[in-house]
Image (cartoon, coloured by chain):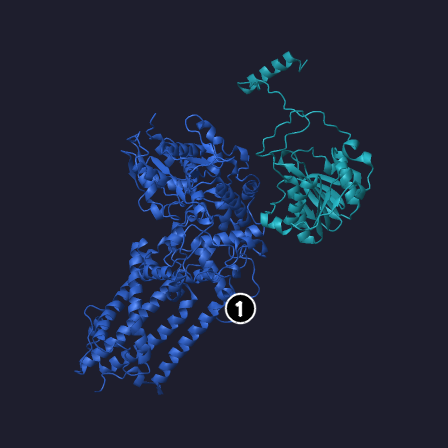
Amino acid sequence: MEILVCVKRVPDTAENEIEVAGDGSDIERDDLVYSVNEWDNYAVEEAIQIVDKVGGSVTVISVGDEEAEEVVRREMAMGANHGILLSDDAFEGSDGKGIATLLKAAVDKGNYDLILTGALADDGAGQIGGMLAAMLDVPYASVVNSIETLDDKKLKVGREIEGGNQEMSEIDLPCVLSIQTGINEPRYVGIRGIRKVASVEIPVWGAADLGLAADSMGAAGARVKRLDYFLPELGEGAEILEGSMEEVAEKLIDLLKAKGGIK
Amino acid sequence: MEPALISPASATIFGIPANIIYILIPLIGIGTFAYIIFRRLTPLLKAAPDDRFNRIPERIRSVLKIWLGQWRHPRYMLPGVVHIFLFAGFLIVGARSTQLMFIGFVDGFQLPGFSGSFGAFYNVLKDYATTWILIAVAIAAVRRAIFKPARYAVPPQYGKDHTWEALLVLGLIAALVISESLFEASLVAAQTHKGLHAEYTAPVTLVWFFKHLLSGSSLAALQGVHSVSYFIHEITFFFFLCFLPMGKHFHVIISIFNVFFMRLDRGNVKPVRYGIDDDKLDDLESFGVKVFEDFTWKHMLDFYTCVDCGRCSDHCPANAAGRPLSPRFISIKGRDYAFKHYPWIGSNGGPSKPLIGDIYSEDEIWSCTTCGACEQECPVTIEYIDKMVDLRRGMVDEGLVPQSLQKPLSALEKRGNPWGKMEKKRADWTKDLAEETPVKILEKGKTAATLYFVDSISSFDDRMQAIARATARILNAAGIDFGILGKAEKDSGHEVRRFGEEMLFQDLKDQNTDAILNSGVENIVTADPHAYNALNKDYSGLPPVEHISQTIVRNVKAGKIRLKPVADTGKTYVYHDPCYLGRHNSLYDDPRAAVDTIPGLNRVEMAGNCRDRSFCCGGGGLMLFYEPEEEQRMGVIRVEMAKKAGADVIVTACPFCLVNIEDAIKVAGLEGEMEAIDLCELIEQHLIIED
């Protein structure tokens, strides 16, 4: 099975202190450390495990600047067979649809049975997987937490839904799946593993390689524009209603009536 | 003069001259034994290299103290003393066994030098030795069969009980000494019967009892006893010889070698591969131990030497906590693997399979805190820590790292500390001190004589920052010119290395070494025993490193630090030896002396569980992040020991010990009854500060 996994280089949100830049254009990035998006990492591990079972190869692809290459390389150190970097100044400022367009163009240059993305990224909107599937006109399942290959035409996928329930579906190949964390236990990639792939060739494809019109990518083609970044003003805090359930319900009804929530 | 009885060399067995049989038995026995040893050596010839032929005078001293002197045996007094008698008896009786072998085909054989008065003295010694051997065997058999000490038990996941092996060998030894004594006693009884000169039998010995027992027997009966007991002795002796390499009694022959080749230093970790320098590590195809043949020959020798005594597991804190680790079975399973894949008869096993998932499990290997209690106890100097580190190196190389450890490792790589906190905040703990005790940060050209190496936990953890502040105040009070590296300091990497991530450790080591050497300091002090051990044992080329307890003791003696009498006279204090100050660095007395510098402080010891028998708090560094399967926390076991000793304050000298013990006090429900305090906090609270 030929699997393509889309990965993104994101700032580490756990311990980084995220501060908004003075002019509201972006967050401060000087002190940040970056790594591969956690959901994407689970997706790569899943792809490697599938290929270990049924054969084939795993290709990792990322849209970013030249620093994004370190993330592609790390996933190759983990066990992905090939890596591709989509990088070009013209890609700067792309919105979600723009990124999906770039990825679709790359998908068209290959022949993939299965495309995986992470369910979302720390700094994203969880939209790439779905958009990509729509553009490719292939079936799509999101927040997948289990994958079973039924044969070379179909997969059985599991999704966690409300109430902690599990929804099982059959999905035809080729398809796009967005992967939820916890689907597996990703293997460790150490410094040694990364050094081993340090000199592996990772092709970089730009706008010309993808053959796309200038207005479909970058800031020029973006239909969503970021206007401002700011921290919301802190209010005084929530008012906590105390008392028994009946008392709290009474108070709540009064408040809603008073503030216009109920007529 | 005619001998009283027909000697073995002159006898016939079913018409065949016995001396032929008694040449054949040793030839076959020794030949088989030699072949078995040759087969046993096979895996060692395929093993990884080891560096054990250095420092010969030290090695000889170790053999004299630990092997000949049985130094570690009395740590378990009764079985230890029993073994010492057994061992001494074997050494003494060795000459007699040799003589007996030759008697089978050389009539009246005596070893060179044993004919005259020395021979007579030896005979008396030998008579007592065989007697005390039998008594020791009897005591051992009763212990094994009836009292069944817990440490010999085999938990079900490790297979069947081993008592049969112990009793079989005890039976063989008993057979040897009994047959030898009967052989001699029957001759003496016959000599007496015939009025000939009877050889001397020492009073109240086995042979003496047998002589009296046999005094009324007929000559025919005595001849029977004499001939049969000799035959039994020879068959048993050579059977025993060939049985030794089949199980735990291999130690009888090879423990002397295992002790000679023992690990001479403590606290350090073996290189990834002997003969490969740090800068050539990238060229290695594979790191660590993945298959059996990746072990060094000394580690394989360790497996063979294991006596199955269980002293290691008896003191293993992971084992006590119910983690899936029993050091004894690391050795026994390794030994049984070697026996199975490299048998003494039949062909060697096929291609090697990974050990993890076969004889060892991942959790088993990650459970170890590297405390060193096992290595401290082992009477035949088996090493465990290096094996754990090597197995972990193998797992890291294969990506088999528990999820709970992947995050801190990644954080260490990116931020130089396991919490992933920002480097620029590493010196934030100094802010609270800014007014009375400004702490110099050695950057932008600032220097100092002494570097206070803080390490990650004391820099970033809210509770442990108190240790850093206390240490700074102590250094200040002593008038020491010191500074810290601030954001240039990275985690010492001590656990990173011991958890198998060697390349990340090398990275941290290089960064720290550069920062330290660039700072121009003349000496280093630290309050973190893991940092202390790392800087001393894992790093090289650094200025001398000292632990804060040593600094305190020296400065109190010199009058530079003066202390008030203890604030709370009602409390009883107990000092808990951290693994990386105590066992790994033999720093037992300085921390105690430091605590005792406070006038009027009442300190007790956790008898039987202090100094080199201290019980690990649960582990430091990356171990704080690992989620083990266990029945109880090690810290809780330790706190209960402190309670039993009558203490209400536990003094620790390690931030990790403090974390684990403070947590354990809560988990054990002893809040309010028991508290924990760091040595530096304790001293700092009692400092007399001149204004």
**Amino acid type shown at disc 1:** Asn
For this orientation, the residue located farthest to the top is A258
Horizontal and vertical percent position of residue B489: 50, 39
Horizontal and vertical percent position of residue A139: 76, 41
Nearest the viewer among B569 and B97 is B569
- Crowding around mark 1 (Cα neighbors within 10 Å: few <14, some 14 to 19, many 20+) is some
Location of mark 1 (residue): B348
Is residue A133 at least partly visible in the picture? no
Nearest the viewer among B611 and B505 is B505
The relative height of residue B312 versus residue B235 in the rendered view (above or below) is above
Nearest the viewer among B90 and B598 is B598
Horizontal and vertical percent position of residue A258: 63, 11
- The chain drawn in cyan is A
Image quadrant occupied by the C terminus of chain A: top right
For this orientation, the residue located farthest to the front is B445
The relative height of residue A99 versus residue B265 in the rendered view (above or below) is above
The residue sitting at 48% across, 39% down in the picture is B519
The residue sitting at 67% across, 53% down in the picture is A53
- The chain drawn in blue is B
Is residue B28 at least partly visible in the picture? yes
The relative height of residue B530 versus residue B44 in the rendered view (above or below) is above
Judged left or right of residue A133, residue A30 is: left
Horizontal and vertical percent position of residue B367: 48, 48
